[in-house]
Amino acid sequence: MSETSNTKLLNAKDFVNMSQLEELYTVACDTTVSVLVEGDHGIGKSESVYAFAERNNFHVEPLFLSHQEVADLIGIPTLERSADDFALTTWSKPIWLHRMEQAAKAGKRCVLFLDELNRAQTEVRQASLQLVLDKQIHEHHLPTTTVNGVTFGTFVVAATNPADGFYQVDELDP
């Protein structure tokens, strides 16, 4: 397991079963740590996120990054006028973020699941890393949820396949 700032990189092969991975999610989701899970196709990386979310009554928002364009993540630029008549570029809110905000307003904690991170186009992957590291994308911040007076941030989990020659994926920066 290697660590960078507030992100943990895990190899799913290190876990005897996926319930151990879900236990890790339980600890990580109450911190500012995002989790990056690497493992072969079909071993249960995605299923572990969905099972964790269901067991804990979290809203899970999956983004299959290999199918995304940058605008899908950050929204579309729009032009507005400031109070002192300057032209400003703002960004429309992506629908996935709107769904997360609605869930948070309803009192549900949120998991943002970034699947196939290392299969995404370079520009999408670069934008996604801001979600993993900073819990925001461009000018949009991931929602917080207040439950019984305690505020929780969005829990971010990203999944990758190994860059071992068997998959058409790009190697991530250390």
Image (spheres, rainbow, N blue to C red):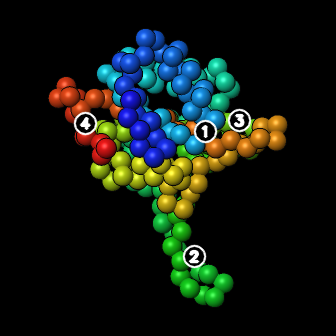
Please rate how many residues cluster around mark 4, counting C-alpha atoms within 10 Å: few if below 14, some from 14 to 19, many from 20. Answer: some
The local secondary structure at tag 1 comes to loop
Nearer the N terminus, badge 4 or badge 3? 3
**Horizontal and vertical percent position of residue 113:** 50, 35
The local secondary structure at tag 4 comes to loop
Nearer the N terminus, badge 2 or badge 3? 2
State yes or no: discs 2 and 3 in contact (Cβ < 8 Å): no
Q: Which residue is mark 1?
A: 31
Cα distance in 3D space between marks 1 and 3:
17 Å
Q: Nearer the viewer, mark 2 or mark 4?
A: 4
- Residue type beneath disc 1: Thr
Q: Which residue is mark 4?
A: 169
Residue drawn at the location 45% of the way across and 46% of the way down? 5
Residue drawn at the location 73% of the way across and 43% of the way down? 151
Q: Quadrant of residue 44?
A: top left
Please rate how many residues cluster around mark 3, counting C-alpha atoms within 10 Å: few if below 14, some from 14 to 19, many from 20. Answer: many
Residue 80: give its label: 2
**Horizontal and vertical percent position of residue 15:** 42, 16
The residue lying toward the viewer, choosing from 169 and 150, is: 150
Q: Nearer the viewer, mark 1 or mark 3?
A: 1
Cα distance in 3D space between marks 4 and 3:
33 Å
The residue lying toward the viewer, choosing from 17 and 60, is: 17
- Residue type beneath disc 3: Lys
Cα distance in 3D space between marks 1 and 4:
29 Å
The local secondary structure at tag 2 comes to strand
Residue drawn at the location 58% of the way across and 43% of the way down? 32
Q: Quadrant of residue 110?
A: top right
The residue lying toward the viewer, choosing from 132 and 88, is: 132
